[in-house]
Every structure is written in C-alpha cells, then in structure tokens.
Amino acid sequence: MGHQIVHQGTVASITGDSMQVRITQRAACSQCSVSAHCHIAEQKEKMVDVNHVKDISRFGVGETVILTFAEQTGMRAVMLAFVVPFLIVVAAVFGCSLFTDSEPVMAMMGILFLIPYYIILYLLRDRLKAKFTFRVEKLMNN
C-alpha cells in the first residue's frame, strides 16, 4: 500500500458528504524541548476539505480525526505545484536567451509561459480534486 502522510485534526464543519478538518502543521523544531521559548518554532492552522466521506454520520463537529494521504499522491502534488512550474520557467528563460540578451524580456517570458500551465490546471481542477483526496478515520479514543 505504500507510505501514508498522516495528520490529526478536528472536524470544523460537515456539509452533505463533505467535511472541513482543521489541522495544525508544525515545523520540525516545534518538537524540541525548548520550542516554547524559541521564536523559530512555527505552527500554522490549515483547513482541509475532505469530500465524498463514506458514512459521514459517524463524525461530529469538534471530533478529533485522523487524515491520511498516500505519500506517492503527495509527491505528485508537489510535482504539479513546484517542479513543473520551475521547469517551465527555466525552459522559457533558456529558450528565450537564444533569441535575445535582454534579461527583463527573458524573465517576462518565463512568467508568461506559466499562464497556459495554470489555465490547464484550473480547467482540470475537478479531476485533480478527485485524485488528491484525504481519507478520514475516527481517532480510536473518541
């Protein structure tokens, strides 16, 4: 089955067969014993949408749940969000450098080449949302 990315969260709202779960992301140093006295330790609260939950009646607002996400799927998301845009910009800048020595033009072309990519991602958002989904499980001691 592969590795899983696991987060513990709290159900914030339930609508139909979907729910929003509040998770707290912590920097690695927040686990340090002196993190309470250090300003580097970082925590962020995020809301995660979980769609098409089977037997959603088992869950209640305020309940602690476990969210799981396949690590391989997470890597695909990173590729789409960071690696592919980076490669597009680099290819556009190097390609443009064959035709001009103007750095502002090369930079502008690098940015402009991202527009079609993000339009394609926007048009495919429903398919991507179906592929990049969290699974939700009840915490055993609830």
Image: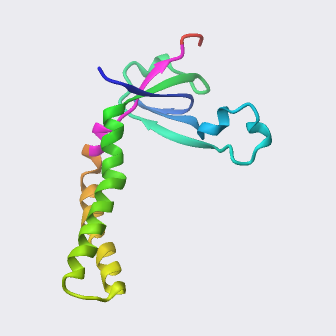
Q: Does 130 lie within the magenta span?
A: yes
**Of residues 80 and 134, which is closer to you in this image?**
80
Tell me where residue 86 sits by quadrant. bottom left
24 with respect to 108 (left or right): right
User: In this picture, which residue range is highlighted in magenta?
Assistant: 128-139
Q: Is residue 44 above or below residue 87?
A: above
Find residue 84 and report its horizontal and vertical position in percent.
Answer: 28, 56
Q: Is residue 124 above or below residue 2?
A: below
Q: Residue at x 35, y 79 (%)?
A: 107
Q: Quadrant of residue 101?
A: bottom left
* Image quarter of residue 127: top left
Residue 88 left/right relative to 138:
left
- Residue 133 location in percent, x, y? 35, 35
Quarter of the image for the N terminus: give it: top left
Q: Residue furthest top?
A: 141
Residue 139 pos. (x, y %): 54, 16
Looking at the image, the residue that sits furthest to the right is 37
Magenta stretch: residue 121 in it?
no
The residue depicted at 33 percent of the width and 73 percent of the height is: 111
The residue drawn where x is 30% and y is 68% is: 89
Pinpoint residue 23: horizontal percent, then vertical percent.
56, 35
Q: Report if residue 8 is visible in the image.
A: yes
State the scheme by which the image is colored.
Answer: rainbow
**Total residue callouts:** 0
Identify the image quadrant of the C terminus: top right
Q: Is residue 26 visible?
A: no
- Please name whichever residue, 64 or 6, is drawn nearer the observer in this view of the structure: 6
Q: Is residue 50 above or below residue 82?
A: above
